[in-house]
Image (cartoon, rainbow, N blue to C red):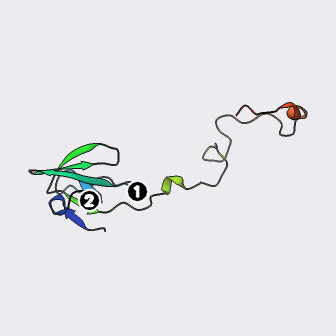
Amino acid sequence: MGNALPLTDMPLGTAMHNIEITRGRGGQLARAAGAVAKLIAKEGKSATLRLPSGEVRLVSQNCLATVGQVGNVGVNQKSLGRKKPTTPWGYPALGRRTRKRKKYSDSFILRCRK
């Protein structure tokens, strides 16, 4: 894992990331956290890749790619640990609740709207 190779040297079905679009330009595809692309075919001088977005794309077989998946897969599932929605400064956003918390008529509400 982590070796950079030209697509000519990779077997079909290899999981890869940080893929060059044109040789020598540096990796431009599949670089986000947890991203992985698969090599699905090789024909002539081009290779076919399935990108994380679902797009299928032709790339030159001379282009380099790094074997494996990008780390930090669960970055978007980490809780920020605070009540939302708030502004970046901590103030309530998207409508502050205006009803009292312990109102007399609460005893008459059988099921909340939300």
* Residue at left offset 10%, top offset 51%: 45
Task: Give how far across and how far down residue 14 sits, in percent.
Answer: 26, 59
Q: Quadrant of the C terminus?
A: top right
Q: From the viewer's perspective, is the residue at label 2 or at label 1 nearer?
A: 2
Residue 73 visible within the image:
yes
The residue tagged 2 is 14
Residue 28 visible within the image:
no
Circle 2 crowding by C-alpha within 10 Å: few under 14, some 14–19, many from 20: some
- On screen, residue 45 versus residue 18, left or right, reads left
Q: Quadrant of the N terminus?
A: bottom left
The Cα–Cα distance between marks 2 and 1, rounded to whole angstroms, is: 15 Å
Q: Secondary structure at mark 1?
A: loop
Instruction: Using the image, determine if residue 97 lies above or below residue 31.
Output: above
Q: Of the residues shown, which amino acid type is indicated by label 2?
A: Thr
Relative depth, front residue between 84 and 14? 14
Task: Give how far across and how far down residue 99 sits, in percent.
Answer: 80, 34
Where is residue 106, by image quadrant?
top right
- On screen, residue 108 versus residue 75, left or right, reads right
Where is residue 24, by image quadrant?
bottom left
Counting residues from the N terminus, which is met first, the one under dot 2 or under dot 1? 2
Relative depth, front residue between 97 and 2? 2
* Residue at left offset 63%, top offset 47%: 89
Task: Give how far across and how far down residue 11 sits, in percent.
Answer: 20, 61
* Residue at left offset 72%, top offset 31%: 113
Q: Point out which mark residue 100 bears.
A: none
Task: Give how far across and how far down residue 109 sits, in percent.
Answer: 83, 32
The residue tagged 1 is 34
Where is residue 111, by image quadrant?
top right
Q: Of the residues shown, which amino acid type is indicated by label 1?
A: Gly
Circle 1 crowding by C-alpha within 10 Å: few under 14, some 14–19, many from 20: some
* Residue at left offset 14%, top offset 55%: 61
Q: Secondary structure at mark 2?
A: loop
